[in-house]
Amino acid sequence: MLILTDVQKVVLSIQPRSAAGNIALVDGKPVWHVSDDAILGLEVSEDGFSATAITTGRLGNARVGVDVDADLGDGVSTISGVIDIEVKASEAVSLDVSAGTPNAK
């Protein structure tokens, strides 16, 4: 699991591979999705082979997935990849001081 703080972003990228581990082609543009867009936003590159995951400020876990068509012909053979991301609070940079209700002595 990738861990980010609530003030970070990260570039995610894909590289399709054949069963022998060689770089492989895919048909069409990859499709990216996120399980909880309240935790992470996605900015997908023009070619679809990378996306920037941007934290929204909310803490929690989200799964980013991407689907591609591995069939180079007329058919469709979808393969998918996922990465789980946990967003945690960043370090403290300020301190709030509050007062309770005043009472008689």
Image (tube, grey):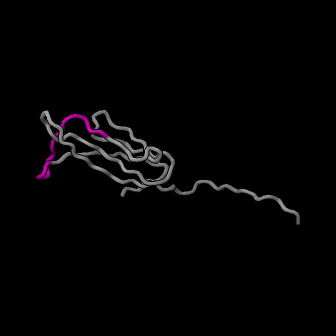
Secondary structure character of the magenta stretch overall: loop
Q: Is residue 27 magenta?
A: yes
Image: magenta residue range: 18-31
Judge by depth and name the residue closer to the eye, 74 or 59: 74
Q: Which quadrant, please, contains the N terminus?
A: bottom left
Which residue appears at 84% of the width and 62% of the height? 103
Q: Position of residue 39 (x, y in %)?
A: 46, 48
Judge by depth and name the residue closer to the eye, 33 or 18: 33
Relative to 52, say whether 97 is above or below. Answer: below
Q: Position of residue 34 (x, y in %)?
A: 38, 45
Which residue appears at 39% of the width and 41% of the height? 42
Q: Position of residue 35 (x, y in %)?
A: 39, 47
Judge by depth and name the residue closer to the eye, 17 or 37: 37
Residue ranking furthest to the front: 75
Relative to 33, say whether 1 is above or below. Answer: below
Which residue appears at 88% of the width and 66% of the height? 105
Query: Is 48 on the left or on the right of 94, as rendered?
Result: left
Query: Is 59 on the left or on the right of 17, as rendered?
Result: right
